[in-house]
Each structure stands twice: as C-alpha cells, then as structure tokens.
Image: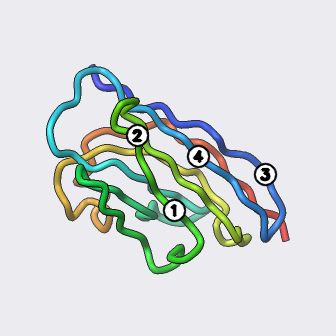
Amino acid sequence: QVQVVESGGGSVQAGGSLRLSCTVSGGIYGGYYMGWFRQPPGKEREGVAAIDSDGKPTYADSVKGRFTVSKDNAKNSVYLQMNGLKPEDTGMYYCAAWWDGRALSMSILVDYWGKGTLVTISS
C-alpha cells in the first residue's frame, strides 16, 4: 500500500523560509510525478509545484522564483524549498504522487495524497 508522508510545515513571518519534505513508500514504480498542492483557508486545493521522473520541475505562476522543488530518487523523496514567503502562501500543503502529467492543474488526477502539513505566514 502506497503511503505519502510529508513534514516541515510551521509558522513564519512574511519574507521567511520553510522547507517541506515528503517520502513516498509502499511499492510505487514507474515514471511518476511527485509534487505539492496547497489549500488556502476557504479556497480550493491548487497545484504548487511538481517534478517529473527526469527531474524537470513545473511551478504555479504564483510561486515561480520563490519556491524550488527537488527530489532524491534514492530516498523516494520530494522537497519544497519556500523562500520569500507571503501571507497568501498560508494553507495546508499536501504532497502527492501521480502519473498523469496534467495533474498539477487537475488535482482529481492525483493518485496518492499525503495528509498535509500546515504552513502559516504572518504579516
């Protein structure tokens, strides 16, 4: 059974940084994507960043230049370095794994979800 476990959320002031980590385990194989979604309070879940099996990253426009997604294939892990954080980055951040390349913009296509980690940015 595939498990997705994320960590690293917390509370920081605007302009600060956080690093999220996620490990996928349980027998997932193949050229899948790993990445991050977030759900701001009162809003729908949205794609933040993804990285494909070759290490190519994709970002939502709102985080380009501030967030960096990376992975460690040996550990089956994905990371999200978040710099220049803004209050609007506040939300529950979910790690995910999927095969359909469209999933970052269509969360219904995600195959596996983590339980989420809370990020709170104060002004």
Describe the element under mark 1 as helix, strand or loop.
strand
**Residue matched to label 1:** 68
Describe the element under mark 2 as helix, strand or loop.
strand
Q: Which of marks 2 and 3 is nearer the N terminus?
A: 3
Spot occupied by residue 29 in the image (x, y as percentages of width and height) = 18, 32
Spot occupied by residue 51 in the image (x, y as percentages of width and height) = 34, 56
Q: Residue 11 carries which label?
A: 3
Rounded to the nearest whole Å, what is the CA distance between mark 4 and mark 2?
Answer: 13 Å
Label 3 near label 4: C-beta < 8 Å? no
Three-letter amino acid code at disc 2? Answer: Asp
Image quadrant of residue 14? bottom right
From the viewer's perspective, tell me whether residue 11 is left or right of residue 45.
right
From the viewer's perspective, tell me whether residue 29 is left or right of residue 104.
left
Label 1 near label 4: C-beta < 8 Å? no
Work out which quarter of the rendered image holds the C terminus and state it. bottom right
Work out which quarter of the rendered image holds the N terminus and state it. top left
**Residue matched to label 4:** 20
Q: Foreground: 103 or 67?
A: 67
From the viewer's perspective, tell me whether residue 23 is left or right of residue 58.
right
